Image: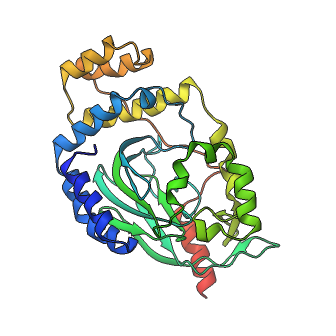
Amino acid sequence: MTHNKFVQKIIQLNKSLLNRHQFHEAAGPILIEMAKDQDFWFDVFKQNLSDKGFLNRKWTTYEIPFLYVYECNDFYLKMHLFVPLKSYEPHVVASAIHHHNNYLLSTYAAFGSGYETMLFEKNFHVNPETKETNLKIREHFTQQQRPLHLVDAWEPHVVINPTSLSATLVLWSPDKKRTTDSLRSNPLLKAIKMPLRKIIYTLKLDKKVGIAAKNTYQFYVKENKFIAIPEDEYFAPTRSQAGSHVDDYSVQTIFAFIQRMGFNDTMFLENMKKNKEVPLFYHKWIDKILKNESIEDTYAKEVINIPGGKMHISEILNADSAIKK
């Protein structure tokens, strides 16, 4: 998508605006333009479904089904897909409260009901013994109320499951341009990633080089209190859940979205079936579109990796009220 007119506009903004907040603010209207352009969506579908690496991706339940748009050392653009619970119950969180370390995230609700979200104050403290955390809600809104919004670096937030299949256009970038940014894609450094991280943490250079903090937490509610849980511990189960059923789930979600966006390029889809690099399990979803048969919803995880396995926004609101008393 390098030559796409919208992507080119964002590339030019990236070159002209060193300040990353200004870059995201200027890029927001372009995300809105993208979402309104059906040709843009269809080009993204074709780009991903023509890419051998994407077609043969080994998905895990840790990942949100997505489509690539563009990426470079300074920023990347993607489409994220969010699905409802099987019960279509509202106000149930999709994952624990979390932040994205030093990354800024602009997100635009481009399709579907959108999700509900909360943003929290950044100046929180985690008790090292009890892991009790004084999180405070800063904003609470739905994507219908604010289709375009920014999540700041280090800003805790939570996503609540939507009530229907929803897509967001997302723009990610580090909070600063650093001379070390290009090293993230260096294959030699990737091979020694863990030993290198240990050295960086020992020298206390993590923020300077722009990597995740050594102790990064997710948060949940227990007995009207916000409790921190180490991020690696929270993510470990979903990162390990992979296999053909997860691949099929992710591809079904993507094809359900493609179908609902009206993509019906028969020649492209027929050629996909003839292409031996396209995994066979894609064929049933391709056939659904070719035969104009509805692709069923996929559903969000009923249980997330916190004590109790579920968190409702009422619990978050109660914990927030208890802290502010």
What count of labels does the image hold? Answer: 0
- Front residue of 230/7: it is 7
In the rendered structure, the answer to whether residue 308 lies left or right of residue 185 reads right
Q: Residue at x 57, y 42 (%)?
A: 187
- Front residue of 86/46: it is 46
In the rendered structure, the answer to whether residue 38 lies left or right of residue 107 reads left
Q: Which x, y percent locates residue 92?
A: 51, 56
In the rendered structure, the answer to whether residue 173 lies left or right of residue 130 reads left
| Residue 233 shows in the view | no
| Depicted 153 relative to depicted 74: above or below | below
Q: Which x, y percent locates residue 117?
A: 44, 64
Q: Residue at x 50, y 28 (%)?
A: 247
Answer with the quarter of the image where residue 126 lies: bottom right
| Depicted 252 relative to depicted 132: above or below | above
Answer with the quarter of the image where residue 291 lies: top left
Q: Residue at x 41, y 61 (%)?
A: 116
Q: Which x, y percent locates residue 185?
A: 52, 48
In the rendered structure, the answer to whether residue 94 lies left or right of residue 203 reads left
| Depicted 257 relative to depicted 101: above or below | above
Image quadrant occupied by the N terminus: top left
Q: Residue furthest bottom?
A: 325
Q: Residue at x 57, y 63 (%)?
A: 97
Q: Which x, y percent locates residue 285?
A: 35, 22
Image quadrant occupied by the C terminus: bottom right
- Front residue of 20/244: it is 20
